[in-house]
Structure formats: C-alpha cells, structure tokens
C-alpha cells in the first residue's frame, strides 16, 4: 500500500531549479533508499516532503492526503519525522532534554524510552551529559532517537552513516533494521553497502531527476547500472 507519493514535484531554491518532475512511490513498511551523487537533489527531496522547501508544482501525498500548503509542524503531526544530515540536536542540552523536546507533551512513554535505550545503550549511559560532549556516532543515535521518541509512520533520514566508524555503522544498521519493522524509513545514503543491506525499494536521482527506480535486490545485482548511475562497483 502506498504511504507517500511524490507526483512530478518541481522545487527551486531561489532562482535555481533543483528538482524536475520528481515522482516517487514509497510503500508502507521497510526501507526505501534514495541514491545519487553529491548535489543530485536528495536532501532537497526530503526537505520538499517536510515542507521546508515548497515545491512550485506537483504534489506530495501522504496516506491519501495532499500536503500542499501544510506547515512543517503540521506535516510532522501527521506522523513524519526528519533526521537531517546536520542531525538537528541541541549541543547545550543533555541527552534527556534533547529527547524531552522531541516529545509532544513533554513526557516520555516509558516503553518507547526503554526500546530506544535497547537500540542505543550509549544514550542511557550518557543520559545527563550535554549533547556536544557525545561522539559523532552517539550524536547520530540521539538524532535518530529524537525521531522515534513518538510513534511515527514515516521517518526521513539523511546520510546517517556519514563520517561514522565501521563499528558504529553496524550498530546503526541493526537499529534501522529494528525500527523498520514498525516504521517506514525513507533513507538517503551514500554508503552503498549500508543502503544495499537495508533497502527494499530504491530510486536514483541525477541532476534533480529520478533516473531509476526498482527493487534494491535487482539494483544490487546490476553492477553495470550501478557504475553508470553512481560510479561505483558492487562488492
Ligand atoms: P549531497 O549528497 O551533497 O548532500 P544532495 O543529493 O542531497 O547532495 P541537495 O543538497 O539536494 O543534493 O542539492 C541539490 C542542488 O541544490 C545542489 O546543486 C546544491 O548546490 C543546490 N542547493 C542545495 N541547497 C541550496 C541552497 N540553500 N542554496 C542554493 N542552492 C542549494
């Protein structure tokens, strides 16, 4: 069942047209991966879904609802969370405070909190530490935890493994695998191994246009296509 559809959206940043007729169909459940070279328009796609950039044409439909004209906060309230590449955490606040701010009513659902601590034990360990003092990987965990501290239907995650050590990438992979059992994830990722092992469906964006869409299993087998679209080879 379709959860989110982008229908021929056009997004410009200032005078610069970035997205051209971008259409995507994200089905409910699992991980949908958006691939593409640097500057292809992946972040702009996520920001267009969240209403942070406004498409000038086309529509973004979530669970049958056309989200045109909705503010970002209203989009979030429909059950969509965004984990930006910059992580969006507050360095001067503790781990606990960062998470409280991400709740709807300032209170934790204890079951959800326990699940987050299971996924990311470091967050329990450093509960009262200011976020700036965490490692890069722990900051990324906090950023993801903020997105799932409330029940969500969809989370948009922008390059969560960027700059992380391999062991942390593995932990992140396990966490996303677990999260994707209950929440659909739209993942932008340059780490192809990570993307390949998590993704069910995928699309490639090039110069603001969708140039390929299909199953990750098929794409992972097609080395020639990967080379053409991403300039990488499969391993
Ligand atoms: P990356 O992997 O490097 O993050 P991306 O695929 O996410 O790339 P976007 O960040 O969506 O790409 O950028 C798409 C295009 O829009 C790029 O050419 C970029 O230079 C341009 N762009 C992005 N943000 C802005 C901005 N604030 N002002 C002007 N141009 C921008």
Image (cartoon, grey):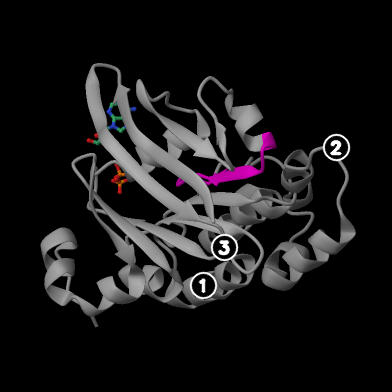
Question: Along the horizontal axis of the image, is 155 left or right of 196?
Answer: right
Q: CA distance from mark 3 to mark 2?
A: 27 Å
**What residue does disc 2 label?**
105
**Position of residue 171 in the picture relative to residue 16 (left or right):** right
Q: Residue at x 41, y 55 (%)?
A: 159
Nearest to viewer (mark 1 / mark 3): 3
Quadrant occupied by the N terminus: bottom right
Q: In the rendered image, which residue does mark 1 sit on?
A: 173
Q: Residue 131 location, x and y as percent?
A: 65, 49
What number is the disc on residue 29? 3
The foreground one among 195 and 129 is: 195
Question: Residue at the location (38% across, 68% down)?
Answer: 195
Q: At 31% from the left edge and 23% from the top edge, which residue is drawn?
A: 13
Q: Which residues are magenta?
A: 77-87
Image quarter for ligand 1 = top left
Nearer-N-terminus badge (1/3): 3
Q: Residue at x 55, y 40 (%)?
A: 62
The disc label shown at residue 211, or none:
none
């Amino acid at each position: 069942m379709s959860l989110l559809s982008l229908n021929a959206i056009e997004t410009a940043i200032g005078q610069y047209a970035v997205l051209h007729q971008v259409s995507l169909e994200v089905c409910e459940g699992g991980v949908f991966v958006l691939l593409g070279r640097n500057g292809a328009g992946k972040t702009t796609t996520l920001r267009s879904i969240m209403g942070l950039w406004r498409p000038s044409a086309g529509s973004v439909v979530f669970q049958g609802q056309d989200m045109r004209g909705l503010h970002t906060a209203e989009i979030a309230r429909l059950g969509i969370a965004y984990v930006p590449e910059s992580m969006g955490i507050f360095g001067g606040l503790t781990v606990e405070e960062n998470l409280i701010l991400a709740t709807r009513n300032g209170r934790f659902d204890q079951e959800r909190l326990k699940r987050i601590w299971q996924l990311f034990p470091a967050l329990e360990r450093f509960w009262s530490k200011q976020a700036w003092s965490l490692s890069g990987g722990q900051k990324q965990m906090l950023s993801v935890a903020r997105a799932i501290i409330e029940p969500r239907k969809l989370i948009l995650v922008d390059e969560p493994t960027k700059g992380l050590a391999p062991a942390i990438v593995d932990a992140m992979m396990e966490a996303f695998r677990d999260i994707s059992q209950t929440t659909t994830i739209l993942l932008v990722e340059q780490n192809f191994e990570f993307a390949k092992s998590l993704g069910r469906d995928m699309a490639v964006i090039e110069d603001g246009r969708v140039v390929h869409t299909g199953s990750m299993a098929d794409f992972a087998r097609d080395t020639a296509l990967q080379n053409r679209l991403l300039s990488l080879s499969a391993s």
